[in-house]
């Protein structure tokens, strides 16, 4: 057995035979031409054909996966129709008297290098897109037909051996595809009936190829680098799209374990098919919004895969915890914007920085505390170090122009803390207006209810914000005076305590008195033994781990 570690970009397990796709040679001969105008006409005709092919591919993707997933190919068409792109190609043809194929390839490399050099990982991922659309134009110029051609023909380059849509497989088997790389258009054309999963040497979690793999429900791993070996063709492999692990020629123990995991996943998928798109509503008509909790931008895929209605808690502190230095405004904007775009119209509630207590970061220089759970953490750091807080707020506001983002403040104990935070938010808004940067002027702001003080002050807090979200982990800790990091207190830290449930009831009632909604984003939200209690208390929203969404929806719909 050979074990390879890559980057998991689309969750799921695949077990099957490897099919290695040979790398396509896009070498183009440079030729001197006599008639630059005729060559420019060739380029324009090829570009128009490529745009038509992309329109067909866009319509195919929209029909199968929805309009929002087809927007990628609208962006690809706009790339080809960009005047700067065309001017560069035609300028090279006119100036150097070179053939159109060579000009297109040269300009593609130039644009791709420009995107790859940018700080934003989202923009870096566009390097693959510009290469993809340019290869399409080169294929037309060279007389190669595309698998999305309007005549229905199937003759792709990297999409080989009958694994494209409408293609004819050489045998009836489905395969795990290994490739140096796959372009977004190639991924969109894969026939899911013949492809079990994808493994590539190159690529990133932010790429459109990765996003398409997640949309298509294909387990996918990128970044295996030099471990990519064409000799693996025909061998059995197991891939785990969540962990990024690849096992070539797996031993019996590994096969047995992953077959068990795959069976569990298929049972979950059966529940998904039964409940996907169904409202989270009781038999009596009581509606509950069912969201999911995430810690990283890549987790958004699991939210969509499990059909959550939105993200109820994006723990933004992980953008700080996983770095050795301060995350810049641009870095954070990129992360928040990526999630907002991937979620479309679905709400994305982002908790502001919640560092401290059990989440320590060296470069914050917080110092030792005898009782950090009651110490310098979360909103207390943000309000006393506003230069840190404002960087995050600016990034959140900028990202709000790309989706349905809301801001949530953690560890609130007083009305003044909320007002101070809103003042800094207004300063950030004013700065962005002055810089003419777009953001959602009516972005919602909420608070986490996780201290007894916030419960007692819930009526006053509700007048200041748009929503409450109850963090039951900390609320249990502070209500029962039990450090949740201390295992010896486990028998005393009972989240089902009547005191904790009374706190939850008081919070919901205060929210409703003031016309705002109230949810739960702590672990208690997924406790199926309490679902009936939360419904009776009138909870408006529950945000749980992505894998808990469907079992919870099933219980609510049968209530």
Image (spheres, rainbow, N blue to C red):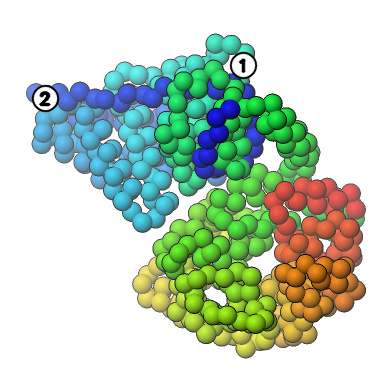
Camera-nearest residue between 60 and 125 = 125
Q: Do the residues labelled 1 and 2 touch (CB within 8 Å)?
A: no
Residue at the outermost top position: 170
Q: Is residue 417 left or right of residue 492?
A: left
Q: In this view, does 355 lie to the left or right of 473?
A: left
Q: Where is residue 434 in the image (x, y as percent from the top left)?
A: 37, 76
> Compared with residue 21, is residue 422 higher up or lower down, i.e. above or below?
below
For the point 52% across and 26% down, the residue is 177
Q: Residue 149 carries which label?
A: none
Number of marks: 2
For the point 64% across and 79% down, the residue is 372
The residue indicated by pointer 2 is 32
> Compared with residue 90, is residue 394 higher up or lower down, i.e. above or below?
below
Camera-nearest label, 1 or 2: 1
> Compared with residue 479, is residue 36 higher up or lower down, i.e. above or below?
above
Circle 2 Cα neighbour tier, 10 Å, few/some/many (<14 / 14–19 / ≥20): few
**Mark sitting earlier along the chain (1/2):** 2
Quadrant hosting residue 480 = bottom right
> Compared with residue 110, is residue 165 higher up or lower down, i.e. above or below?
above
Q: Where is residue 282 in the image (x, y as percent from the top left)?
A: 86, 54
Quadrant hosting residue 442 = bottom right
Q: Is residue 182 left or right of residue 250?
A: left
Q: In this view, does 97 lie to the left or right of 40?
A: left
Camera-nearest residue between 87 and 527 = 527
Secondary structure under tag 2 reads loop
Residue 260 in view here: yes
The residue indicated by pointer 1 is 173
Residue at the outermost bottom position: 416
For the point 12% across and 24% down, the residue is 33
């Amino acid at each position: 057995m050979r074990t390879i570690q890559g980057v998991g970009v689309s969750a799921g397990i695949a077990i099957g035979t490897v099919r290695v796709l040979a790398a396509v040679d896009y070498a183009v001969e440079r030729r001197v031409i006599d008639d630059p105008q005729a060559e420019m006409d060739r380029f324009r005709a090829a570009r128009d054909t490529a745009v038509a092919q992309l329109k067909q591919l866009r319509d195919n993707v929209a029909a199968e996966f929805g309009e929002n997933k087809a927007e990628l190919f609208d962006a690809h068409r706009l790339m080809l129709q960009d005047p700067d792109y065309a001017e560069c190609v035609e300028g090279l043809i006119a100036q150097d008297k070179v053939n159109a194929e060579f000009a297109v390839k040269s300009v593609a490399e130039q644009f791709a290098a420009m995107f790859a050099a940018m700080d934003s990982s989202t923009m870096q991922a566009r390097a693959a897109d510009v290469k993809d659309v340019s290869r399409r134009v080169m294929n037309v110029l060279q007389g190669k037909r595309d698998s999305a051609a309007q005549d229905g023909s199937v003759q792709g380059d990297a999409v080989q051996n009958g694994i494209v849509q409408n293609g004819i497989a050489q045998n009836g088997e489905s395969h795990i595809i290994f490739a140096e790389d796959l372009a977004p258009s190639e991924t969109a054309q894969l026939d899911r009936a013949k492809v079990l999963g994808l493994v590539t040497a190159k690529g990133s979690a932010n790429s459109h190829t990765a996003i398409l793999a997640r949309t298509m429900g294909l387990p996918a791993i990128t970044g295996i680098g030099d471990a990519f070996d064409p000799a693996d063709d025909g061998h059995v492999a197991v891939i785990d799209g969540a962990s990024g692990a690849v096992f070539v020629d797996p031993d019996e123990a590994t096969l047995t374990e992953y077959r068990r995991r795959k069976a569990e996943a298929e049972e979950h998928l059966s529940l998904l098919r039964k409940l996907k798109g169904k409202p989270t509503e009781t038999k009596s008509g009581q509606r509950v919004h069912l969201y999911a909790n995430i810690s990283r931008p890549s987790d958004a895929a699991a939210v969509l895969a499990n059909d959550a209605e939105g993200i109820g808690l994006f723990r933004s502190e992980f953008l700080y915890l996983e770095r050795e230095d301060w995350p810049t405004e641009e870095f954070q904007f990129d992360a928040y914007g990526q999630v907002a775009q991937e979620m479309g119209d679905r709400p994305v509630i982002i908790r502001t920085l919640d560092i401290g207590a059990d989440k320590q970061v060296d470069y914050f220089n917080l110092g030792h505390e005898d009782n950090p759970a009651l110490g310098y953490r979360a909103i207390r750091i943000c309000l006393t170090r506003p230069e840190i807080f404002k960087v995050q707020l600016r990034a959140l506001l900028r990202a709000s122009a790309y989706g349905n983002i809301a801001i949530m403040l953690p560890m609130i104990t007083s009305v003044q803390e909320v007002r101070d935070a809103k003042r800094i938010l207004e300063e950030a808004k004013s700065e962005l207006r002055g810089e003419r940067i777009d953001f959602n002027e009516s972005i919602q702001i909420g608070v986490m209810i996780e201290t007894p003080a916030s419960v007692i002050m819930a009526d006053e807090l509700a007048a200041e914000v748009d929503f409450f979200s109850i963090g039951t982990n900390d609320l249990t800790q502070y209500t029962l005076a039990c450090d949740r990091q201390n295992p010896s207190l486990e028998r005393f830290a009972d989240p089902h305590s009547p005191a904790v449930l009374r706190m939850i009831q008081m919070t919901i009632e205060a929210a409703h008195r003031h016309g705002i909604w109230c949810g739960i984003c702590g672990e208690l939200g997924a406790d199926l033994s309490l679902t009936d209690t939360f419904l009776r208390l009138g909870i408006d929203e529950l945000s749980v781990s992505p894998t808990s969404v469907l079992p919870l929806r099933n219980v609510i719909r049968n209530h």
